[in-house]
Structures are given as C-alpha cells and as structure tokens.
Amino acid sequence: MVTSDAKKQLLKLLLRIAVTVGLLSWVFQSVSLVDLRSVAAHAKWQYLALVCLFNVLLFWIRAFRSQLIFKRLDCPVGLPTLFGASAVMTLYGMVLPGVLSLAAKWQVLKRCTGKGSNVLSGMLYSQVSVMLVMLAFGLLALALGGPVDQTQMGQAGGTGSLYVATAVLLALVLVTYACMCSPAGTRLDALSNALIRRLPEPVARKVRTVTGQLAVFRTVGPRFHLTIASLTFVTGVMGGGLLLKLAAQSVSISVPALVFVWMYVLIYLLGRLPISLANCGVREFVLVGVLGAYGIDSSAALLMSVILFAAQLFLALIGALYQLSWSLQRNKNSHQ
C-alpha cells in the first residue's frame, strides 16, 4: 500500500518532470532542427573538452574554499574527499533537484568525518556566503551589462539601474557584517534562542548545536570572510562567466563579457530551486531567452546549453567513480 509520504514524493517528482518538459518544449518550439544541425556541423568541438576540464578546476578550487571553512570548525577534510563529495553531489543532482542534492554531499562528509553537525554548519555558512556574493555581483553585472538599449531608455535609465544594484550590493554587505560581528550577532542570538525554544526539544538541541558552531565565524575576523568571498568571486562570478564564455566560443556566440557573468548567476540561483531535474529546462530557457535578446540564434544558444550539460555529466561521471571507489572500500573494510 502506498503511503501518503510516498504519494507526496511522487507528486513532487511529477511536477518537476512537468516543469522540465514544459520549459524544454518552449525551447524546442523556437529552434529549427535544420539550423541546429548546421550549427552542430560548424561547432568547435575542441572547446567541449576545455569546458569539462575547466569545470573540474572550478570545483577543485571550491573544494579548497570548503576546506578553509571546515578547518575553522575543527573538522579537517582532505581536498580529494571534498572534491569527491561535490562530484557525488553533482551525480545525485541529476535526480535530486536544487538544494536537495546537498544532502548527498552532507552524507558523504558526515561519514568521512563523523561530525555531522560540524559539516552541516560549514555547508550552511558556505551556501549563505555563495548566495550573497553571487547575487550581489550578479546584480552589478546586470546593471552594467544587461540588455538595455540606451538610445531608447536614455542614460538616466542605465544609471538608475546601476544605483539600484549598488544599493542592493551595499545592503547585502551590511547585513553580512551585522550577522558576523559580535555585537549584532549577540542580538541575533537572543532572537534565534527565543524562536528555538518553541521547537520540540530534540530538534531544538540540534539547532542549538548548529547555531553555536556558526557563532565561530563571528570571531575569525574580516580577513577570513574576505578570503572566502574572494574565492567565491573567483570561482562563482568570474569562473562561472568564463565557463559560459568558453561554451559560447564553441558555437561562435559573441556577447559582452558581463552578460555571461549575470547569466551564470541567474542559472545558478534558479538551479537552487527544486523545480526541475538536473537543471534541465531552466538552463535552456535562460540561455535561449537571454541570448535571443542580443540577436543570437536559438539553435546556437541551445547547443551551448548542451555543451554545459555535457560538462555537468562529466563531473557526475567522476562522482560515480568516487562513489564506486568508496563503496568498494567500505565493503573491503567490513570484511576485515
């Protein structure tokens, strides 16, 4: 007999499939198969290997960033393990949408370290910092390089967009500082403790453990936060934009560099939402829609998306190899 939880999970899966199919249907309706074959025939396929390898490099640098975070929580983890956990997360992300795939990474690191709450705290800090940096610089890139026709909107319109993005950026920085500095953090602790007391005791105990560990980041000083933000900027903002630029070069797409930056941020943020499978549909919808505003043929934009998806599959394959290796090692240890 099917339980109510199973029915809910099935319904969610069907909804994600529906969203994915709906978005892909819209994309393929705007694509000519004849044009797609022509673009594929003239594509520079040597860029495919470059995109895959560069994506691996970005994940390796992100593993180093995570290593710095976990070290502050007295939870040392090796770079190969962190990279493997991220690759496994990508593997499970082919089925588990959005942030739900983070559970796979947490499970791997928990098993390797035996410190589940430390891992959870580190991943929470990492995700918040990534979201803030990506959103802030994505908005700034959108203001400076968005699809704004200055002849129609005027210089004031472009300047106004820049002011709005700058104000949001400053607000995010101030909020982050308020959360990290001790005086404001103490006030936030009082508020969070009042909310935690309303939770059931077993849950409240675990939440207190995580919030207590997060308080460590208020004592590390601004240099640590600046280092983490800088690595996020390099791998998420600049690196992500360059990843899209390399994929675009394979199909001879040429748009301003800042467009690749805010497109990557948009794809990343939408990809965190559990609305599709393996980010399929969302990625294609953004690329075809945005690049179309710059006069790029939808067939070229779709093929660019396929190359990015291939890079994701390549990382997922590495994750499968890590998963297989770890499983064999556990079985070997259990028989000793």
Image (spheres, grey):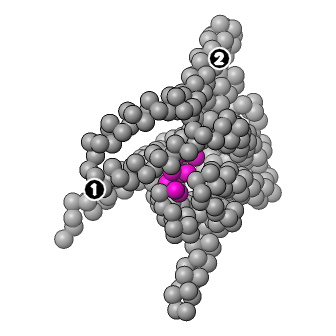
Q: Quadrant of residue 137?
A: top right
Q: Position of residue 280 (x, y in %)?
A: 52, 51
Total marks in image: 2
For residue 102, above or below residue 162: below
Of residue 326 and residue 313, the one placed in the foreground of this image is 326
Circle 1 is placed at which residue position?
8
Q: Please report the bounds of the magenta region as a residue range.
A: 118-127
For residue 206, above or below residue 194: below
| Residue 125 covered by magenta stretch | yes
Of residue 254 and residue 187, the one placed in the foreground of this image is 187
Whether residue 48 is visible here, answered yes or no, is no
Secondary structure of the residue carrying tag 1 is helix
214 relative position to 71: left or right: left
Farthest residue, direction bottom: 336
Of residue 12 and residue 249, the one placed in the foreground of this image is 12
Q: Position of residue 195 (x, y in %)?
A: 32, 38
The residue positioned 39% from the left and 34% from the top of the image is 190
Q: Amino acid at mark 2?
A: Leu
Gap in angstroms between the C-alphas marked 1 and 2: 43 Å
* The C terminus, quarter of image: bottom right
Q: Position of residue 315 (x, y in %)?
A: 65, 62
Magenta stretch, main secondary structure, is: helix
Circle 2 is placed at which residue position?
162
